[in-house]
Amino acid sequence: MQAGSIRKVLIFSLSFTATVIAHAQGDSAGASLTEVVVTAQRMGNNPLWVPYAIGKIDSQYLHQYGPRTTAEALQGVKGVFVQKTNHGGGSAFIRGLTGNQTLILVDGIRLNNATFRYGPNQYLNTIDPYLINSIEVAKGTGSVQYGSDALGGVIHVLTADPRFSENQKHWSGGVILRGMTGGMEKTARGTIGYSSKRAAFTGGLTYRNFGDLIGGDSTGKQTPSGYTEWAFNTKAKFALRNNMELTLSQQYLEQTNVPVYHKIVLENFEINEFVKQQRGLQYAKLDIRGRHPLFNKVELIASYQQSGEERGSLKRGSVLYRKERDEVNTTGLTANMQSVLSQGWKANTGVELYHDKVRSFRSDINRQNNLSKPSRGLYPDGAAYGNYSLYSLHHFKLNNWIADAGLRFNSFSISLRDSALGPIKLHPSALVWNASLMYVFRQHHFYATYSTGYRAPNIDDLGSLGVVDFRFEVPSANLEPEKSGNAEVGYKFKTDKLRGDVAFYRMNLRDLITRVKGNEIRSGYPVYSKTNIEHAIIKGLEAEVVWKPVRSVELAANGTYTYGQNTSKQEPLRRIPPLHGRFTGTLRADGWFAIVELLAAGKQHRLATGDKEDNRIPIGGTPGWWVLNAYGGYELNCLKLSAGLQNGFNQDYRTHGSGINGVGRSAWIAAAVSL
């Protein structure tokens, strides 16, 4: 699809929204939404009454669309663009930012750690999609609510909870089987559950085998790109008292032999893969419903998270196999107190403490004599990263007016020892705030908001030494936090048959940590170091409208436009997504559902110098594309059947910045049996 045609996606969405606004003036307000979101304000609220741009998908959405991975579940969500460096990766862009400039949470716990890198990463795919109850996306805000890294926004994955039984004790179980044409997927999952009045438990085991990804039209099989994955989880809830609940949870996921496809195809590697990618999370959460307005609800979370990333590479014609492994162990403690200070005044106040310990190893193994030569890892071994903060969020309601305001102070303790720079100790800090105002007139909600944000330098910024993407990085010292200011105005509405929203925003980015190219060449790559020298702006708009002419039919359209400019270099900002959007039509009746989906993206030809040097981006930019998908399913008592047809016209396409093309014409089928 040509760029001019793609623009019609957004134009149609905006025109449709304007028409709907006019229609809504005379429509009844309808029943209030039962949907609740928690991320944007750290307390449950109807999304219509939240003065920020937000998005949400739930378990029904995941069942119907059947996304292969957690990252792919977000493709098509308004305001989110998903890039895939490899088949086992998936990095979501929010407001034109990704990687360590967006924050990922799992059940309120930070997934981001001290080694998250700038640009796309694969860590969202370390969350098993079969655990998920919902995913919430808060855009342009999050630093006050959750701390460092939320420049673009927050992706919050909420896992399913076991439920107490009202009457007798009850055991349950289930099996999920899923397969895809061309041998591209074989998935099996088993679950078990128990519930009683005072205790509930759920657990599951998932095994997945992904074959090489088959692209559209002339692309064919992209070899090597397949990999294997397994995961398990447990979650238990206990009603300790009538006002107190304890949750214990454990998650683990491991991917093995995930090829970095573009490295092998374009950079003369015989082997370049994530030999093993692991993430484990254990946490205990205590929820207390207080009897005093000041302590209306108290939440305490103690967590321990382990991540491991082992990489292997071998150049063609070389006998030296490079093996690298990085490990990060994170201890966390958070306390959040909700208060009802008056009839129209609620507040959240809390403290968050996280501490990362980094281990990093590297060795070169001679495949002829099997001799191993150890050397410094990608990061300084033994580096430590402390992240400590206090925050207070306040929510006001007076007649037709709603206001939000918050403040967070964050300090860091960073220590590492580098062979070139010697011992480094940094103690950066940041004070950020946000404020918003919403006016409600019947079913119309108008809002304006301003949020400041920051991202403190991490171990990846300070201590990287080695090949990253298509460059060689060397350590840097004395880095300061990146900073942002995001202004946004928007409108939301809901009637019996129509709902929608539109948001306009402008973000100013200051003191960006950027790589600066030197004159040296190491291992065949140009050498880069990092420094706080760049400033940029990102602005754009997003719109969505959903129409239900009758109970069983739903039509939806959304569009997102993002413009980024590096004002320091007077050139486009790197990795800005193109104009993109989605149309869907859904039919539901008597246990059946059928969905038609059109995903589209325009050409991205506004390229930064770094984009032009990126071998994942074609010369002149990434072409525009459109993909037609269809989904359907049937539910009967304990059996759920679902299926999908992807890329029905077998379009050959690539999402901007990806290292592998999208899937061609293919189909999947899944069956879930519950006992």
Image: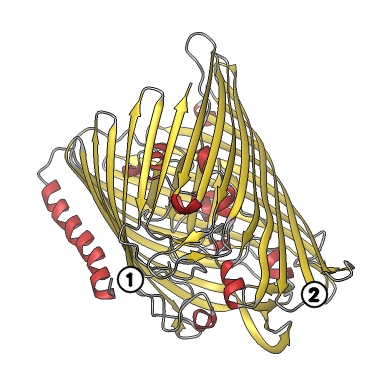
Give the camera-side residue of 472 and 529. 472
Q: Which colour scheme is used?
A: secondary structure
Residue type pointed to by label 1: Gly
Count numbered badges in the picture. 2
Labels 2 and 1 touching (C-beta < 8 A): no
Please give left or right for residue 384 compared with residue 392 in the image: right
**Splitting the image into 4 quarters, where does residue 623 fall?**
bottom left
Residue 311 visible to an observer of this rendering = yes
The spot of residue 461 in percent (x, y) is 67, 69
Q: Is residue 157 above or below residue 591?
A: below
The spot of residue 374 in percent (x, y) is 87, 67
Q: Which of marks 2 and 1 is nearer the N terminus?
A: 2
Give the camera-side residue of 566 and 170. 170
Q: Is residue 38 above or below residue 76?
A: above
Residue 40 visible to an observer of this rendering = no
Quarter of the image that includes the N terminus: bottom left
In the rendering, which numbered label is found on residue 602?
1
Q: Name the residue located 49 percent from the left edge and 28 percent from the top edge.
A: 293
For label 1, the SS is loop
For label 2, the SS is loop
The spot of residue 314 in percent (x, y) is 72, 71
Residue type pointed to by label 2: Val
In the rendering, which numbered label is found on residue 319?
2
The spot of residue 353 in percent (x, y) is 68, 47
Please give left or right for residue 555 compared with residue 450 in the image: left
In the rendering, which numbered label is found on residue 191?
none
The mark closer to the camera, 2 or 1, is 2
